Amino acid sequence: VLYRRFGFIPGDEEGESVSQTLEYAYDDTCIARVAGHIGRIDAATRFAQRAQGWKHLFDPATRFFRARISGHWFTPFDPAEVNFNYTEANAWQYRFFVTHDVAGLIAAHGGAEPFAAALDSLFAVDSEFSGLQQADITGMIGQYAQGNEPSHAMAYLYAYAGQPWKTQRLVRQIVDTLYHDGPEGLCGNEDCGQMSAWFLFSTL
């Protein structure tokens, strides 16, 4: 109801509001595409428009997704803090979770070069995080968390920014260092096969 009313989840109404908003926006794109395939152009248009709701929580000053509390940004803001605004993650780990509109996210960052620089910072910043203790934040390269699904597309986003060699280097690094064939060979919760699926896709 809140998402339909506002186009995003207000942080003072529900927990994990940023994650919910971004994931609902992705879901809306999926609905829009299916609707388009079956000839429901009205529904396709409506859901495609609602899928742009990610923009409500994108702060152009910090270039992070932040919760809105009573119409204002949640403060104080520390992107490394794990808090009730994100699901099993922090602002770094949801910073690029707009896989349904990568072109729009690149534009929101000011173009391909600043977008690639933001990705660079994700993989280079200190891996420590503050706030709530969260067992799912594992497999760290900077603030990138291979052990949890919201991060899984991020190494591939360099290709959209015109720097595919960085995708190639990082994917190779992740495959070589965060997976092995022992009993604990996965760096995170398998979650119905996602850790293995990423590995198979990436090695192919």
Image: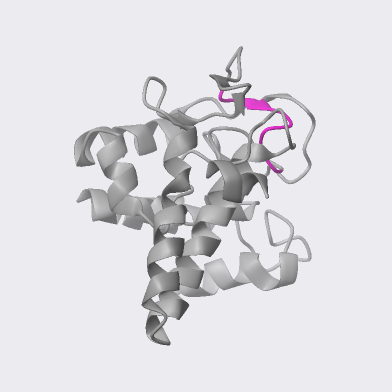
The location of residue 79, given as percent across then percent down, is 56, 25
- Out of 16 and 118, give the one closest to the viewer: 16
In this picture the colour scheme is one colour
Residue nearest the observer in this picture, 113 or 29: 29
Q: Position of residue 183 (x, y in %)?
A: 78, 66
Task: Indicate whether 69 appears above or below 27.
Answer: above
| Left/right of residue 59 with respect to residue 140 in the rendered view | left
Picture coordinates of residue 165, whole percent (x, y):
26, 53
* Displayed quadrant of residue 196: bottom right
Quadrant assignment, res 80: top right
Q: Nearer the viewer, residue 184 or 78?
A: 78
Q: How many marks?
A: 0
**Residue 204 seen by the camera:** no
Name the quadrant of the C terminus: bottom left
Q: Residue at x 46, y 54 (%)?
A: 50
Residue reaching furthest top? 76
Q: Residue at x 34, y 52 (%)?
A: 102
191 left or right of 53?
right
Asked whether the viewer can see residue 34, the reply is yes
Residue 46, located in which quarter of the rendered image? bottom left
Magenta portion: prevailing SS class: loop
Residue depicted at 54% across the width and 48% down the height = 22
What span is in magenta?
A: 79-87
Which residue is rendered at x = 54% and y = 68% of the image?
Answer: 199
Q: Inspect the magenta stretch and tell me whether residue 131 lies in it.
A: no
Q: x, y (%) of residue 16? A: 70, 39
Query: Is-magenta flag for residue 82?
Result: yes
Between 178 and 135, the one lying in front of the other is: 135
